[in-house]
Image: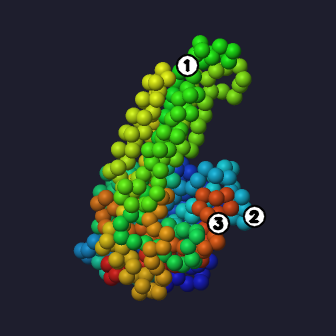
Amino acid sequence: MLSNSDLVELTAFRRNLHRYPEISGEEEQTAKTIVKALDKLKLTKVLTGLGGHGVAAVFDSGADGPTVLFRAELDALPIQELSDNDWVSQMDGKGHLCGHDGHMTMLLALGRMLSREPIAKGRVVLMFQPAEEDGSGARAVVADPAFQEIKPDWAFAIHNEPGRPFGYVSTRTGLINCASQGLQIRLTGKTAHAASPEDGVSPTLAVSKLIPALSALGTGGTLDDGFRLVTVTHVNVGEPTFGIAPADAVIYATLRTAHDGPMSVIHDDACNLAKTIADEFGLKVEFETFDDFAASINDEEATNVAVSAMNAIGVPNGNEGLPMRASEDFGVFGWDAKAAMLCLGSGENYAALHNPDYDFHDDLIPVGASIFERIARDLLG
């Protein structure tokens, strides 16, 4: 149970995190702030440097039982915050505009409750994961040899979701978040004087042909097992000048599928298409992949555990708004554990995630922490 003084302290902590956001892979000070806050808890051990700047706090009962992991994210976004709040970001061009500061605070709240009333069996791991926003963090944590020491049997995460009623949780068995991948296509030809474009090899016509062809590879539609979506997000051709016919072009495309397996297929389709068009116009082509997110697929048993816990403490829940096209790298923890993602409503008219005017709703801290605690009690006593 969290007291009023707990909530005041936790809210202040969350707002302090909000002032000093760090983007993916740069969360060194955030991790240090978390480690310092963990000093107040009755922990068995703390692991640092997991997959980069990841931090894992372990409550071990000493009795046989499963390991249950609860995950929050350390990183912020490279977006300038627009806010009149006293706790507005002090870091130019960076902001906690996805609520990860609130998610971290939920885990610390859970830690306070577990410190006061220890689990009866097994272990709880509070996992503060780096680099969620670019899709690299969960993979790096799971691949870290030190992770084997805390490898979970169960894994749970909460993400706040504006647009849903405040305190309502959406979850379901099966697909929650799509797999996605950023594909950079670089075309290279030869410059020429703008008065004699025939002396060069321009990528302009190739780009004009490639953009609609890429989009046609995945047109979205119903989010079923065959879902494919390609979104061209950025195009740059040549230099901003009138005297030079261009030689170079770069296209960014985001690929989305409902599951991990089909991602390699649509990736190959996009690369083969670009190569065919590049060859047609006498261009060289190179590819690079970024922001590679695994699909988040909820395990049936883990979902049932979470729903039972929410029902027991009176948290309204259902499957509204699911599955989602947006991506989340929590799914990696479900590769070797029974995992479930819960989407916690911030309010139907609340500012959207990744918007410059977004801020985490502090009243969600006790809601999320209480859900996590009940899950832990149901599994570990």
The image shows residue 203 at horizontal and vertical percentages of 55, 26
Numbered disc 1: secondary structure: loop
Residue at the disc numbered 3: 351
Up-down relation of residue 287 to residue 175 (above or below): above
Asked whether residue 208 is in view, the answer is yes
Residue at the disc numbered 2: 84
Residue 82 quadrant: bottom right
Q: Amino acid at mark 2?
A: Asp
Up-down relation of residue 288 to residue 215 (above or below): above
Q: Amino acid at mark 1?
A: Val
Judge by depth and name the residue closer to the eye, 70 or 183.
183
The image shows residue 32 at horizontal and vertical percentages of 52, 57
Asked whether residue 331 is in view, the answer is no
Whichever of callouts 2 and 1 sits on the residue coming sooner in the sequence is 2
* Residue at left offset 43%, top offset 39%: 270
Q: Amino acid at mark 3?
A: Ala
Up-down relation of residue 368 to residue 280 (above or below): below
Q: Which mark is residue 201?
A: 1
Tell me which colouring the rendered structure shows. Answer: rainbow
Q: CA distance from mark 2 to mark 3?
A: 14 Å
Residue 246 quadrant: top right
In screen coordinates, is 379 left or right of 136?
Answer: left
Q: Which mark is residue 9?
A: none
Within 10 Å of the Cα at label 2, are there few (<14), some (14-19), or many (20+) other Cα atoms? few
Pair 2/1: label in front: 1
Numbered disc 2: secondary structure: loop
* Residue at left offset 54%, top offset 78%: 167
The image shows residue 75 at horizontal and vertical percentages of 53, 55
The image shows residue 272 at horizontal and vertical percentages of 39, 34
